[in-house]
Image: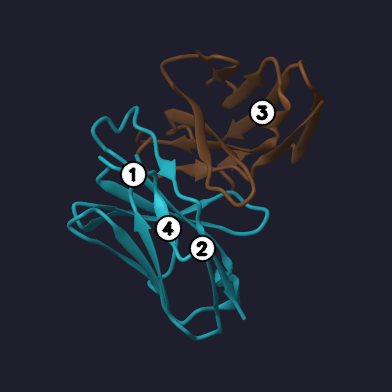
Amino acid sequence: DAGVTQSPTHLIKTRGQQVTLRCSPKSGHDTVSWYQQALGQGPQFIFQYYEEEERQRGNFPDRFSGHQFPNYSSELNVNALLLGDSALYLCASSSGDNPSTDTQYFGPGTRLTVL
Amino acid sequence: DQQVKQNSPSLSVQEGRISILNCDYTNSMFDYFLWYKKYPAEGPTFLISISSIKDKNEDGRFTVFLNKSAKHLSLHIVPSQPGDSAVYFCASSSQGGSEKLVFGKGMKLTVNP
């Protein structure tokens, strides 16, 4: 049973560029959340997708957008990249059947470096 | 405004001894708490969780204690093993484990053989 997968593993971009990160959830999961982990910090919630809709959003600017596909996979898009966007981007999936007890399972992350 | 705090950045213990990792939170709406551990170059791995209706949850060598009045939780690992060496994150949610998680900064645990 494949866990959460993310691509690419590493990415280097320059300021002002746009980037797309991809995530495939764990088998049986229909909910995908994205987190940003800056160096020395804990993961910070960006947004969550369920049934192809953004269900929750954290305190991130509109430059951060996402999408969920019918097969539950998801993309994170970041426009007009800033140096401060350099971070590890983590995708997590969950089933949402029992939100009070369900657990989010994380992928290995995509390391984004903005030069 | 940090709602989940892990005030100790690191802890070093001897193999076989107890490891105690602490976490404090400020948001009274949090009702579900989780611990994740993270190895380098990997994503966080779920370890154990506890609902606010309980004050203790045990899973093998891992026990989480919740003190709601103090807004404090702790993770006990007994006995500690070298393979437990990792960064441990405390996370909280006001809507259950599958909803938005608020993480602490993490604490690096080193278990020495």
The foreground one among B93 and B86 is B86
Query: What kind of residue is marked 1?
Result: Lys
Residue under pointer 1: A26
Separation of residues labelled 2 and 4 (CA atoms): 7 Å
State which chain is coloured brown: B
* B77 displayed left or right of B90: right
User: Chain A is shown in which shade?
Assistant: cyan
Residue under pointer 3: B22
Separation of residues labelled 2 and 1 (CA atoms): 17 Å
On screen, residue A60 above or below A4 = below
Separation of residues labelled 3 and 4 (CA atoms): 31 Å
Instruction: List x then y, in percent, for residue B21.
Output: 68, 27
Parent chain of label 2: A
Task: Determine the residue positioned at 62% across, 23% down.
Answer: B74
Q: Are marks 2 and 1 on the same chain?
A: yes
Residue under pointer 2: A9
The quarter of the rendered structure image containing the C terminus of chain B is top right
Parent chain of label 1: A
Chain-order first, disc 2 or disc 1? 2
Q: Are marks 4 and 1 on the same chain?
A: yes
Task: Determine the residue positioned at 43% across, 37% down.
Answer: B93
Query: What kind of residue is marked 4?
Result: Gln
Q: Are marks 1 and 3 on the same chain?
A: no
Q: Nearer the viewer, mark 3 or mark 4?
A: 4
Residue under pointer 4: A6
Q: Are marks 2 and 4 on the same chain?
A: yes
